Image (cartoon, rainbow, N blue to C red):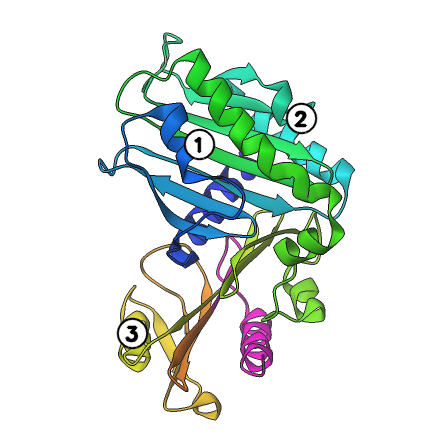
Amino acid sequence: MKQAWKVGVLLLAMSGAAVAAQKCPVIETSMVDKGFGGGPWRVMSGGPGECSFMAADTSVNFGFSHMVSESTELAQKAAVEMREAIAGNSLVEPILALGEEGFAYQQKDDSGAVVDPKSMFFYGHRGSVSVSGYLNLKGTITPAQRDFAAHLIASTLGVASKPKALAKESDCPYLDDALVKQLLPTGNVSAIVPGKESCVMSADGRVITVAVTKGPRSADAAAGMMQGGGCTVDPLPKFGKTAGIAHHCKEGNPRAQVIVATGGRMLEIAYVPGAEPTDEQRATVIAMMEFALKH
């Protein structure tokens, strides 16, 4: 189940980091409205490799996110592993529009019946790009709506053959490659870059997230984050008055989380390896923040 856990964490991290947008650069809102109805729909977040849409009823939503792997073979392998991971508790439907190993799936109960026919998930690949998607509607999702969602999601995979666009989806300006390699030493390193101020890197169930927010209350927000989760927080005065690294948290996943407020912005870098980070790993996350503050 490692691959399924990883994708869930990535989507959660991405949705928390994504910045509200007026437009999705790869899918027109009018197409979503036309295909699913129940509108008007609006863009909630958007970037080079991620968009989310929502109707007036917030339970009605649709979205996708890209993950860039190190090679075409590894992206296809990730799709196979994902399918194997969810096959036991999901109804899986092959979707060739999403790639040779692409599929849609819905959770099923012990009798084999779909738990929630109003909800569906998607997974696909093209070149070195993998894509995860979701669709939640007011009523039962029809085969036509399923196929429409799959084709919308597949239409975003053209980036796989565009080197410059692909670089935007995989290059996180706040992370140093050598430091990433120290924390993600093995496995297929995948990247999600929802926007200019956020990114996610992952491999073998280990995840690094970066989020940058700007505003006059960034110091208050940073202080509040360091007080939450029941974490041990070590001050980092070299980064400023409001700066620290949280670890050994009582709530949430084991993690090392460096939070800094400076110059009207808050930067957060978190490392979630699946077990409590070591002293050496915490030092690497601090070094990552030092790099990020210069960019």
- For residue 131, side relative to residue 233 (left or right): right
Sequence order check, earlier mark of 3 and 2: 2
Q: Which mark is residue 99?
A: 2
Residue at 57%, 44% in the rendered image: 66
Badges 2 and 1: C-beta atoms under 8 Å apart? no
Q: Quadrant of the C terminus?
A: bottom right
Q: Nearer the viewer, mark 2 or mark 1?
A: 1
Residue 92 picture location, percent across and down: 52, 17
Q: Residues within 10 Å of mark 1 (few under 14, many from 20)?
A: few
Question: Can see residue 48?
Answer: yes
Badges 3 and 2: C-beta atoms under 8 Å apart? no
Instruction: Determine whether 105 is above or below 10 in the image.
Output: above
Distance from the alpha carbon under mark 2 to that under mark 1: 22 Å
Distance from the alpha carbon under mark 3 to that under mark 1: 37 Å
Q: Quadrant of residue 38?
A: top left
Whether residue 60 appears in magenta in the rendering, the answer is no
Q: Which mark is residue 31?
A: 1
Residue 291 picture location, percent across and down: 60, 79
Query: Secondary structure beneath disc 2?
Result: loop
- For residue 58, side relative to residue 192 (left or right): left
- For residue 294, side relative to residue 163 (left or right): left
Question: Can see residue 89?
Answer: no
